[in-house]
Image (cartoon, helix red, strand yellow):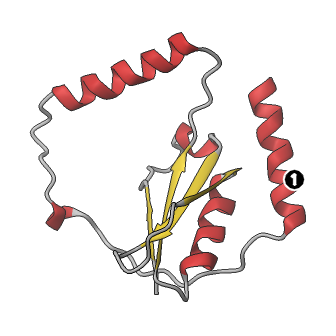
Amino acid sequence: MGTLVTLDLPTGSPVADLPWVITIGSIGDEEDWEPVVCGPYERAHALALAQAVVADEQLMAVVEPLLPRPDAESIRDEIDLARAALEEPTGDVETDDEYETRRVRPGRPPTEAEVREGWSRIAARLTA
């Protein structure tokens, strides 16, 4: 059984509406190959596809939002936000012991037609 890592979003988070990517790689040092990055997908499709791929193999899938930014300045702004968040002490120092692990049973992955419909919705959001 593989591992799936993703953000635990609160209900109604606007991040859920972003396009998502899946990065799949080897769990251990036994295999030495470059991770495969797939996407963009809608979040539910990304999670279902990642679960289906890692369900029976020793692979790790990371499902994360893609931040579509139209220019270098907005990318720099995201970098500044990430750096600022790292520098601000929050009082909530997480350790490896505080991460929650959930076992999930893979559901039905989306069909190719469902994924293509999702791509259409993503394209419409990105070009609106």
Name the image quarter holding residue 87: top left
13 lies left or right of 38: left
How would you rate the neighbour count of disc 1 (Cα within 10 Å): few for under 14, some for 14-19, many for 20 or more? some
- Please give the name of the residue rendered at 60% of the width and 23% of the height, measured from the top-left corner: 69
Name the image quarter holding residue 112: bottom right
Q: Nearer the viewer, residue 108 or 71?
A: 71
Read off the residue under disc 1: 117
- Please give the name of the residue rendered at 62% of the width and 40% of the height, measured from the top-left corner: 18
Residue extending farthest right: 113
Question: Residue 55: image x %, image y %?
Answer: 55, 84
Q: Secondary structure at mark 1?
A: helix
Name the image quarter holding residue 28: bottom left
Type of the residue with mark 1: Glu
In the image, residue 15 above or below residue 64:
above
- Please give the name of the residue rendered at 39% of the width and 23% of the height, measured from the top-left corner: 79
80 lies left or right of 128: left
Question: Residue 66: image x %, image y %?
Answer: 58, 40
Question: Residue 36: image x %, image y %?
Answer: 59, 60
